[in-house]
Amino acid sequence: MIPKKVIEAAEERIAIGGQLVKIGEYKGFEVYTCEYQEEMTIGLPELYLWDGSRVKTVCGEEAPEIMGSVS
């Protein structure tokens, strides 16, 4: 189950058709992002890092770097 705070953080991406999915773990965080059924040009990915109590939103050039390190 995706935490409510992660869903709230991703509200804008969900509104344009994104589906939240967990993509793995990174330095003690669960990492979530939005996937889209249709091809979309939205810029760099936006990640939601969940530590069990709060969400850190990561976008920009840092996001692809983290995605490359997700296990």
Image: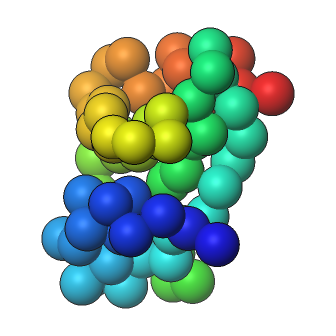
At a point 52% along the width and 16% down the height, the residue shown is 65
- In this view, 48 is above or below 7: above
At a point 50% along the width and 54% down the height, the residue shown is 33
Location of the N terminus (image quadrant)? bottom right
User: What sort of colour scheme is used for the picture?
Assistant: rainbow
Residue 39 coordinates in the image, percent (x, y)? 49, 74
**34 relative to 69 in the view: left or right:** left
Residue 46 coordinates in the image, percent (x, y)? 35, 45
Residue lying farthest front? 53
Q: In this rendering, does residue 13 appear at all?
A: no
At a point 69% along the width and 48% down the height, the residue shown is 23
Which quadrant holds residue 56? top left
- In this view, 66 is above or below 29: above
Which quadrant holds residue 48? top left
Q: In this rendering, does residue 49 appear at all?
A: yes
- In this view, 67 is above or below 16: above
- In this view, 45 is above or below 34: above
At a point 69% along the width and 17% down the height, the residue shown is 69
- Closest to the observer: 28 or 66? 28
- Closest to the observer: 4 or 48? 4
